[in-house]
Amino acid sequence: MPETAPATADPLGRAAADAENWRRAGRRVLAHMIGEMAYEEMVVPEAASTNVPGGAPGWTLSVDGGVTYGFTARRGGFGSWHVDPASLVRRTREGEAPAWDPALFVTDAQATVGLPGDSLAEVVRDLLATHAAEARLASSALGAAELADLPYEDLEGHQTGHPCIFVNKGRLGFSAADAARYSPEARGSFRLVWIAVHPDLGRFQSMAGTERHELLTRELDGDQREEFAEAVRGRGEDPDAYLWMPVHPFQWDEVIAPLFASEIALGRVVRLGVSRDRYRPFQSIRTLMNLDRPDRFNVKVPLMIRNTLVWRGLSATQTGCAPHTSTWLRSLAERDPYLAETGVVMLAERASATVSHPVFDRMPQAPYRFHELLGTIWREPVHGHLAPGERARTMACLLLEGSDGRALVTELVERSGLEPQVWLDRFLGALFPPVLHYLHRYGASFTPHGENVVLVFDGDETPVRIALKDFGSDVELLPFDLPEYAEIPDPVRSVLHRWKPEELAHSVLSAICAGHLRFLADIVERQLGVPGATLWRLAREQVLAYQERFPELADRFGMFDLLAPQVGRVALNREQLMGGGFHERAERDAEFDVMHGLVDNPLSQP
């Protein structure tokens, strides 16, 4: 049985060989790039002297060497820019031509942005890979109705990546063949490598009710378990004493086989074989869904690739915390009457395995990626939490626009039969209450961006509740202990990230508002006729309704201050492009996200 499904096309794909598709994809990346650079004030467009035909606001952006870019853009809440890709032009002394090349733009704008040469080369490398991924998406784009009909697993392959980061699909470390096999937009499948690890190398943690042998019984068929056990017995070892875990085939080939070669030779790491089940990545790429047995766990595994802000390994500390934070968060959801009322589902990380490298583990100053080589998190799939007639989609899907120019959210609203504003109010009413309650009542924040929030829709395509995920690395607490923290085991509480209240507030202000609603507001204004200001007013009403429901938490409302007139601007692209030694430092999360200036908070406006 092959470890992976073979790539079905040339590694570059037909998307890269089609000139018009390549330009179309480039225009989308370039528009995203200019819009987010302007949002973070890395560049400062100026209003054109006249508007273009049709009355759209025209803008010019002067960069190095007398080059000017022109475009139309719409402005929105949180100081956002929404650039029309079709409007982009590049002007030089030789004249004007359509602009579509993001790599050319970043080299044009190097001095304007302030990118040093070594950073520029890395940015171009990342941009070209993102451009290629965008071309693959564009070459197989579907209309909005077709997107709405897709099951959860298939819709993930049409998502377009992090909305706030324009270099969002680089996956540096993947070859072209790897991208054609392992990326979400490839929409393929592959099998995982299973290994057994000597007990003095690996550590297993789990929630109550998920013991190690029970987990293997759930994840592997009986005859395959026996086949794997024989591989350990053949080394003269006890298979029950070893820790069994899945590994991504890329990670096995690129990292485990070469860097754990000594442990493999000595029988301390034993390759068992490959899974019968086929897997496919979510947008988060290192989290995988089981295509053949959707009832089996999603698995999160490390990859030695760099995508968006970080290397995509698994921190042993945070991975070890995952089942314990899941236990705490799940227990709150089960016994808190308000959380029960919201219907929120906490997709628990039922178990995790962490494996230290015998040599790198003695090198605390090594770049963090060398401490995140091998581990696994087993997470509950959302399907087991759906009632008959319900279906799930990640919140990110609401930002999708089909090949017919129609937004998926437009299609869903039409199918619901509700007025657009009513549908949006239902959506926000499902989203805000549980997130606000965890933050204010329990001092716990997540990163509830578009991929970590799963919307649950009823049979009429109306959002009715949410599921939340990713509790291994994205749960943060206040820098001081609240009474509500007493239930968290001491070793876990001591290592979870601690941020100031105004930083924890960004789980709402940045992850939800600036990271999702900022883009959704533009879509609903263009396609549903709902002014962006109306969406922000509906979001504000959710915050006010929560505050009215829990007046005893007034001191905490002031502490987090979600309705402040201005809030800090999280500048992810500044961090991505100009983070200096960010990628080489020993600790992944040494500081809170890079902030740049203040933006007006639309939640503060009545």
Image (spheres, helix red, strand yellow):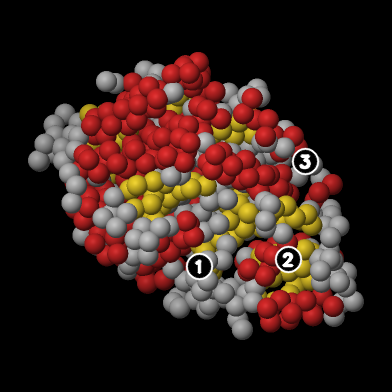
- Closer to viewer: mark 3 or mark 2: 2
Q: Which residue bears the numbered disc 2?
A: 213
Quadrant location of the C terminus?
top left
Can you name the residue that lies furthest to the bottom here?
1
- Closer to viewer: mark 3 or mark 1: 1
Can residue 376 be seen at all in this image of the molecule? yes
- Is residue 113 or residue 2 the one in the foreground? 2
- Closer to viewer: mark 2 or mark 1: 2
Give the numbered dot on residue 481.
Answer: none
State which quadrant residue 514 falls in: top left
Alpha-carbon span between mark 3 and mark 1:
40 Å
Q: Which residue bears the numbered disc 3?
A: 365
Disc 2 crowd, CA 10 A, few/some/many (<14, 14-19, 20+): few
Can residue 182 be seen at all in this image of the molecule? no
Give the residue type at disc 2: His
Residue 67: x %, y % from top left? 32, 39
Alpha-carbon span between mark 3 and mark 2:
36 Å
> What residue sits 27% from the left and 28% below the top?
537
Please tell me whether mark 1 sits on a helix, a strand or a loop.
loop
- Image check: 102 left or right of 421? right
Q: Which residue bears the numbered disc 1?
A: 294
Q: Are marks 3 and 2 in contact (CB under 8 Å)?
A: no
